[in-house]
Amino acid sequence: MRSTDITRRSTWRQRAARWLDPTVARWDVSPPETPEPPPTEERGPGPWPAICEQFALRILASAYQMGAHLEAVEADEQDPERLERLYRIDHANTRIRRHAENLQVLLGRRVEDADPQTVPLVDVVRAAASAVEHYPRIRVGHVVELAVVEFAADDVIRVLTELLDNATRFSPPTAPVTVSAFVTEDGGVLLRVEDAGVGLHPDHLTQLNALLSGQPAVPVALDPAAHLGLAVVAHLAVAQRLRVALTTRPAGGTTATVAVPGALLCEIPAPGPAAAAPAPPPAWPPAVHRTDPWSTPMATPHHGADTPTVRLATIAPPAGEPPPTTGLPTTGLPRRVPESVRDRVPAPRPAADTGAGSPPEAWPDETAAFAAGVSDARTPTDGEGRQ
């Protein structure tokens, strides 16, 4: 038997022994048949981040499309029970959109809003609570009257959403979760989320706070898949320079705090012209004495801000007579009276004043004379022809 056959047989036996018992490889390791390739440059993450980003964008597009359809169906639904079911589906669709946005955050992508705007803190709390599954248990405490600037409002909402979601998930089903916002000494705002859950182990608490600060401890003993929400919070906190921390409550439970720096805060903006309350109408013009009530001009509608306002002119009562009492306000715009005028008895006509004008019995003669004068005026005289 040749030496080549002996070498092949021993190699096969070593492979079989290694397959049957991996510990054999520690005792007798044969050199590899082919040399390993030389070490090359460190490989990047590969195509998976781009693939995950495309999946997130497709999920977001589907969620927005579903939301538009649900909004149209909800507007036409009249049954309260079906409308309640549609609201639950809409709320689940909101959470789907939130998870897709969180996937973009974990990929290091910036989630851009089509219409960024400055948001008051109370609306930040409401928006965060609306994206949580167990939102009925959230209680809003004291919230300072400040707003978050437009470029950071959405990220603050996402941070608060994940903290509220954790607080509601890891606390009793009947226990409320309280969220509040207070001003700090350095001009910032401290958001507090308090729950009455079982709390966190001291070792886990230290590692989670290190994760939220952007400096995770090495080695990490926590399962990243079990803390996806806090991983999203850590990414956004580093991006917006927020200080997030978890502490254990003495009475049981956990308190999550978010320190928002003063650079991300501003005063609540005044409402725009469309949302501003209408100004009270100016005083009416002075009364106009008119002998013929039918000559009162009609009011023209108001079209635009540059069009002058035209109001109905009032008719002043004769001198010496008190103003009529109609039950309507004497100032402001005229209003309709919720009454029926069908059964109303007309007021008696005042007695004719014989000292001014002709008596009623002379009206037929005067009318006939007026008609005869009109007829004579229309009859052509001698020497005059039609043109």
Image: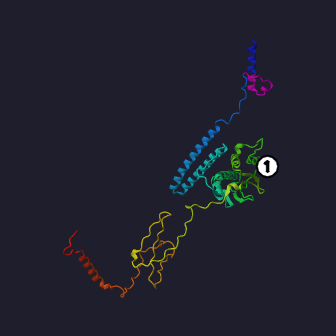
Kindly identify which residue carries mark 1: 202
Residue sitting at x 19%, y 74%? 383
* Image mark count: 1
- Estimate the x, y position of residue 99 in percent, counting from the top left: 63, 47
Residue toward you, 43 or 129: 43
Q: Is residue 259 above or below residue 292?
A: above
- Please name whichever residue, 155 or 217, is drawn nearer the observer in this view of the structure: 155
Relative depth, front residue between 353 and 338: 353
Across and down, in percent, residue 192 comes to 72, 56
Q: If the image is split into quadrants, where does the N terminus sit?
A: top right
**159 above or below 146?**
above
The coloring applied to the image is rainbow
**Amino acid type for the residue under numbered disc 1:** Pro
Q: Magenta stretch?
A: 14-33
Left or right side of 246 for 154? left
**Quarter of the picture holding the C terminus:** bottom left
